[in-house]
Amino acid sequence: MKLDIEKTEIALNVATTQISELIVSLNSQVADIEEKYKGVIPDASTKEGYDTCKAIRKEVMPTKTALEKARVTLKGPITEAGKFIDQSFNPLIERALNVYKPFVDAYQEVDKEKQRFENLRLAEVTEQLYHISNIAMSCIGKTSIVIAATIEEFSEFQIDSKIFRDKTDEATGSFNNSMSVLGDMYLQAVRQEEMDAKEAEMLARQEARQAEMNAQQAEMDAKQAEMIAREEAFNKKMQAQSTIQQQVVEETQPDVEQVNIFCDESSYEPLQLLKKEETIWDKLTNFEVEVGLSKGQTEWLTRIITPYLK
């Protein structure tokens, strides 16, 4: 649809030209007034100055009033024409809008859906770029096995140019850099684990050696304690034997006076006397068993006692 507004536009242009020419003329008149009073200082402190101020107002005021009246006069028809134009054209514009607006709504809905998918794509690209750039950070402090598994999984990552589009080169560069960093981390982890294994092995050998030395020392301490215990037991046994031997010697010496009283030359019975005084024979019989004397020790005691039994 083509609107034929050329005649109307020409008429408006003519009016605008005439108004412009009028403004040029009025501008010159106002400039003359400005130039006339440019150097005059408004001073109403004296009667002459006061009268001058009022005279200037009286002279210039009609010009200002004429200009304001001309503005209103010329603007009136134009303002009314503008209102008429708005009232006439706006309904027509609304009717034209109602014709094509449903079609606009239809393709804008498609555009919104496209934008929604584009936003999702951009979000995915941003997330994947972050993942590619920071994959190595997730392996800090991990074992070589974990890093190797990460490298194997990450190596299968596909950079789809349909998704990354203008970010494809950035994603490819970041991917290659991350793979390089992961490789370095893997080698460093392997070296560290080997050093840790050697250190652990050396520590285990030291602990085993220390345990062996402790066991040997414990065995030596046990043997020494056993020797001390045996020596103490032997000393106690010898002391007990010495004490018993002394007691036997003392107990087997007969009382001479008692012998003289109860014995004479015709009836000398020392054996019966000694048997009455003490049960020496019983002691001799059980001495070896109770005290643990050897056969030689028992014979020695017998030699001591025998003279007194004759």
Image (cartoon, rainbow, N blue to C red):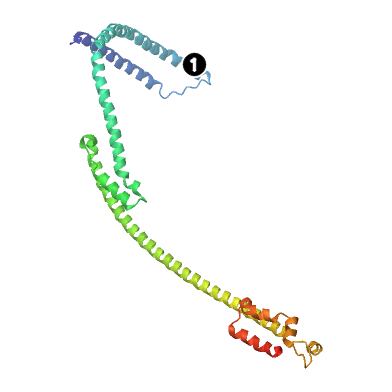
Q: Report helix, strand or loop for mark 1.
A: helix
The answer to whether 51 is drawn above or below residue 139 in the figure is: above
The image shows residue 193 at horizontal and vertical percentages of: 34, 57
Residue 298 location (% of width, % of height): 62, 84
Which image quarter: residue 93? Answer: top left
Q: What is the total number of numbered labels drawn onto the structure image?
A: 1
Identity of the residue drawn at 32% across and 49% down: 146
Q: Nearer the viewer, residue 160 or 17?
A: 160
Crowding near the residue tagged with mark 1, few <14, some 14–19, many ≥20 C-alpha atoms within 10 Å? few
The quarter of the displayed image where residue 73 is located: top left
The three-letter amino acid code for the residue at tag 1 is Asp
Residue 173: x %, y % from top left = 24, 45
- The answer to whether 235 appears left or right of 35 in the picture is right
Q: Residue at x 32, y 44 (%)?
A: 134
Q: Is residue 294 above or below residue 158?
A: below
Please name the residue shown 52% across and 18% down the image: 47
Of 63 and 223, nearer the camera is 223
Q: Position of residue 15 (x, y in %)?
A: 26, 10
The answer to whether residue 196 is above or below residue 163 is: below
Where, quadrant-wise, is the C terminus in this rendering? Answer: bottom right
Name the quadrant containing residue 248: bottom right
For disc 1, the marked residue is: 51
> Who is closer to the viewer here, 99 or 214?
214
Q: Which residue is depicted at the point 63% across and 87% down?
A: 300
Picture quarter with the N terminus = top left
64 on left or right of 163: right
**Which is more toward the observer, 294 or 39?**
294
Which residue of the protein is positioned furthest toward the front in this rendering?
A: 266
